[in-house]
Amino acid sequence: LILPKLANISSINLQILLPDEAFILRDSTYLKYNDAPWCVLDESCLYCHDCVERKIALGLGVTPVKSYLLEDLDISDEFSEEFGQEEKLTQRLSNILRDYPRDITFLKEILQNADDAGASQLFIILD
């Protein structure tokens, strides 16, 4: 199948045809990919057939349903508020380290985190 090799050509101006739910070939830029099956779908949209993998569909210009639904969402209503980190990152890290138990568990946790992150070296500075 040639489609996996085409997944990275979205920057080239080509008309790519993909099957919709009824197996009718459509221009990929007119299709939506249903990556939100829990949402009520817009009946006026054309959806890419589920035989096309998500990565390939998105690489070929199909719009994900989640992005499509969020385009017109107005988040500046009375029920929302901005959120974010309230304390400085250095203060947050200091507080996290302060709350760790002061025994061998701390060293094990640091080593496990480094291993999970794929670290090849770990430096510990005692201040």
Image (cartoon, helix red, strand yellow):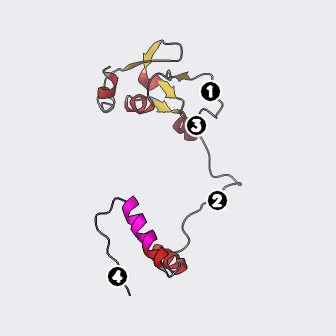
Q: CA distance from mark 3 to mark 1?
A: 9 Å
Left or right, 64 with respect to 75, comes to left
Mark 1 element type: loop
Residue 72 rendering spot, x and y as whole percentages? 58, 39
Residue 67 rendering spot, x and y as whole percentages? 52, 38
Give the residue number, with chain letter if any, for mark 2: 81
Q: CA distance from mark 4 to mark 2?
A: 39 Å
Report the magenta stretch's main SS.
Answer: helix
> Which label is found at residue 73?
none
Residue 43 rendering spot, x and y as whole percentages? 63, 22
Left or right, 23 with respect to 83, comes to left
Query: Between disc 2 and disc 3, whose residue precedes?
Result: 3
Q: CA distance from mark 2 to mark 1?
A: 28 Å
Q: CA distance from mark 3 to mark 4?
A: 48 Å
- Assess disc 1: are there few (<14), some (14-19) or many (≥20) residues with their C-alpha within 10 Å of its C-alpha: few
Q: At 48% across and 12% down in the image, what residue appears?
A: 24
Q: Which residues are magenta?
A: 108-118
Q: 96 or 109: nearer the eye?
A: 109
Q: Residue at the front extreme?
A: 104
Q: CA distance from mark 2 to mark 3?
A: 20 Å
> Which label is found at residue 42?
1
Q: 111 or 80: nearer the eye?
A: 111
Give the residue number, with chain letter if any, for mark 4: 125
Q: CA distance from mark 1 to mark 4?
A: 56 Å
Q: Quadrant of the N terminus?
A: top left
Q: Is residue 59 above or below residue 103?
A: above
Mark 2 element type: loop
Q: Is residue 83 above or below residue 105?
A: above
Query: Between disc 3 and disc 4, whose residue precedes?
Result: 3
